[in-house]
Image (cartoon, grey):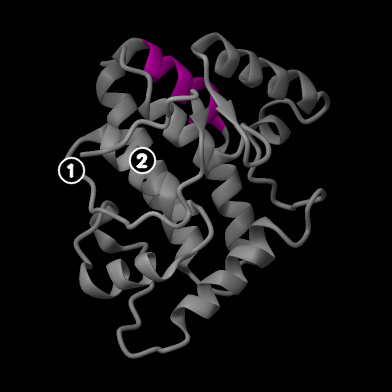
Amino acid sequence: MRESFETSSNQFLPRQNEVFLKPLDGFVDSLVFFARVLSPPTQALVDLLRNDPGLPGNGSWILFYPEDPELLKKLQQEHTRLFVSAYPELNPSPFASSHLNPKHPQQTLQEIEALFQIRGWSYEGGRCDRLEVLLEAGSQIGNEAERREFLNRYCRPWLDDFAEQLASRASLPFYPGLLGAIGELLESELAEEEE
């Protein structure tokens, strides 16, 4: 059973050390799964990749090296290089506000922070407009129309551009493929709901 990110103190806590569980077949569970895979890599992630190629997105995004003892190290280095080491000038930026409102990103960040406050959520791990935080936040919205509106507003519009920019900087196919799978999930699920 998936845990809510609303803990007893209503804090949204990153789950970087949590054991990965394969998501159930639902859209919400896939959002949570992808949010966790975007977090810094752990041995649990590597074990999952090695042992279960039938993951969301038909497994096409998975870097599958069952015999590579350096896989965890490679993924950690790639994650750091793409998402951490260039901060605060990450290019491409994993922050929604940088893409949705490049001239005034602080306005979009404040809008997202206000949504978190309205729902009683807090995020202690940095900015709440990071893609993985937004995916998991979207998973916590119980009303389907509100979830659709949230994901269409804060994730879907910039994901393709971000994936394309990231692909040009990535040295491994893992993260570009992962973003492609997330984009396909959002496109297929949200397009179905629009019809």
Q: Is residue 83 left or right of residue 75?
A: right
| Disc 2 target residue | 32
The quarter of the displayed image where residue 49 is located: bottom left
Judging from the image, what secondary structure is the residue with disc 1 in?
A: loop
Q: Nearer the viewer, residue 62 or 1?
A: 1
The secondary structure that most of the magenta stretch takes on is: helix
* 37 in relation to 50, above or below: above
Looking at the rendered structure, the kind of residue marked 2 is Val
What number is the disc on residue 83? none
Q: Is residue 87 magenta?
A: no
* 66 in relation to 152, above or below: below
Q: Is residue 171 left or right of residue 61?
A: right
Q: Is residue 151 magenta?
A: yes
CA distance separating discs 2 and 1: 10 Å
Which residue is depicted at the point 49% across and 52% down? 38
| Residue 11, percent from left and from top | 52, 29
Judging from the image, what secondary structure is the residue with disc 2 in?
A: helix
The residue stretch that appears in magenta: 146-157
| Residue 171, percent from left and from top | 59, 74
Q: Is residue 72 left or right of residue 50?
A: right
The quarter of the displayed image where residue 85 is located: bottom right
* 87 in relation to 123, above or below: below
Q: Residues within 10 Å of mark 1 (few under 14, many from 20)?
A: few
| Disc 1 target residue | 24
